[in-house]
Amino acid sequence: VVEGGFPEVVTKYASGQVLQNFGVNYEQYQKQGNGYRYFLQPLEGIYLDSNLEAEMKPPGSRSRIYFFVLIAFLIILIAAINFTNLSTARSANRAREVGIRKTLGSERSQLIKQFLVEALMIAFFAGVVSLVIAASLLPLFNDLTHKSLSWHSLLTPQFMIIYFGLVLITGLLSGTYPALFLSGFSPLQAIRGRFLGSGSGMGLRNGLVVFQFGISIFLIASTIMVYRQLAFTQNKELGFDKESLVILKGTGDLGGIEAETFMNELRDIPDVLAVGGCSNQPGEIFPGTSFRAEGATETTTGSIIWIDDGYPECMEMNVLQGRAFSKDYDDSTSVIINQSALSELGIADPIGKTLTTQDNFLNADEETQTQYTIVGLIEDFHFQSLHHPITPLFFIHNSRNFNSGANNQTTLRIGSGGWPATMMAVEQVWKQFQPDKPFRHAFLDQQWASLYNEEITSRKVFSLFSLLAIFIACLGLLALANYMTEQRMKEIGIRKVLGASVGGIVGLLSSSFLRLVIFALIFAVPIAYYFLSNWLDGFAYRTNLSWWVFAVSGLLAMVIAGATVGYTSLRAAMINPIKSIKSD
């Protein structure tokens, strides 16, 4: 109800100002694509669902959480596949038990219950052990993710209900098919062992191995792309040089001649190459503003930054047309724009054109609108992280100081000489002019890197989860390969007696599993391509999804599977053939 009344309030109080500034009523103003939108935001939804600027703290990402939940589910699924594979593969060990129990009158439903209970008990004890491991590793997890979770959060009733509910589902998921499979044996065939020659369950086991390594290939490809995208965002050309820049924070109290003297003192330090003042640095939150070009009926909304004469040179920005601010001119009503602002304004030759704004902090009083003259065009640069596209940016000279923070930061470009000595000299200048304020400084490259802390943390966690999933898949493959090799020991012995080489036997035993990995690659690549393409679409600036990512992923999967199966095959091939033939 409250939110529904916002449009009426906006129309009531904004109409007069819009008519005064643009000569149109508010309805026409809205039809032109302008207007104001106010809405209510649930407090609980701010952290995960907000895409707004200037939140109380940097928001999280619900999609990132869902992605980690998906990986956790895939890890559990791989473990469940291992249990199913090994249970059905080792069915011979319990076949006679099933046959005898059925002969003595046991119903199939009783056997199903028994096998399900066994699977659930294994899942339950695994769940208890995992809680102990999770509590033990929680400090390491907090260090990795920069969180402050405590083990007490693992003991809440709500968490325990959800957790052991998942344990129950996992037990049922992994135990249902083995229970149905084992309980379905014919008593006579089970006692005689003849069912082993039918190949029962082989197709399912192969299918599960393909699915398991398909997941592994998907995770390997995803890990590679996460690393590539993060490297791309951190190394992309930004339009300014962020290296060797020191930011002094809190210099806004220095005004007039004192501020100029302060900056000249900094310039006199031998290894200080350039000095500039500004209100905001790239990567920080910039205030919003709007300008209207001469003769236009629509405004261009963008961001604003107050700078002095030396800032563009200090940042090594590229002035494409016109000039930067200069002491040789009165730039109190001058404005410099970036290429995105020029495109939005729709001006052909910007230098000398005028812009007006209704924003009070850019006008001397509310009754008049100051005309700002465009004196320069700066090449687009990234003043926000690469999550966001470059938007219009307007540079105002800090002599137009209706904003208390217009020159609140001083930027220094330091040479390649001795940094400690230079910083000590800078601190001495600071204490000379502001002895009562603490010396606060930062490095712009570090501030910029901090914009990607969430991605860096996600990359570490994602890589760890991927390694864990691949490790579990290899454990299952190793156990299955061991069992399948045991079933062929007599065949291996006979082949060696007839002259087969160790390499030939290893190739024979490994080839069937490696074929499954190839099938997994064919199965996984289209799915991985679809998901990774959608993930990359969420970035304003992204790297390419190259074919070699999937080739490397498949090759790594084959190497991992080959090493796992090859170890088992080599060990079997080295056994004395006499012992192999004697064993039954």
Image (cartoon, helix red, strand yellow):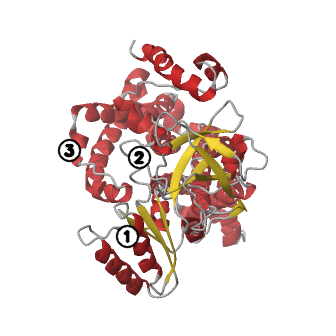
Frontmost residue, 267 versus 329: 329
| Residue 389 in view here | no
| Residue 44 in view here | yes
Which residue is label 1 attached to? Answer: 258
Residue 443 figure quarter: bottom left
Q: Earlier in the sequence, mark 1 or mark 3?
A: 3
The kind of secondary structure element at disc 3 is: helix
Which residue is label 2 attached to? Answer: 58
Dot 1 and dot 2 residues touching (CB under 8 Å):
no
Residue at point 57%, 51% (across, down): 333
Q: Badge 2 local density, few (<14 within 10 Å), some, or many (20+)?
A: some
Q: Earlier in the sequence, mark 1 or mark 2?
A: 2
Against 503, is 116 above or below? above
Q: Nearer the viewer, mark 1 or mark 3?
A: 1
Classify residue 467 as left or right of residue 439.
right
Report how far apart the C-alphas of labels 1 and 3 lie in the structure: 55 Å
Amino acid type at circle 3 is His
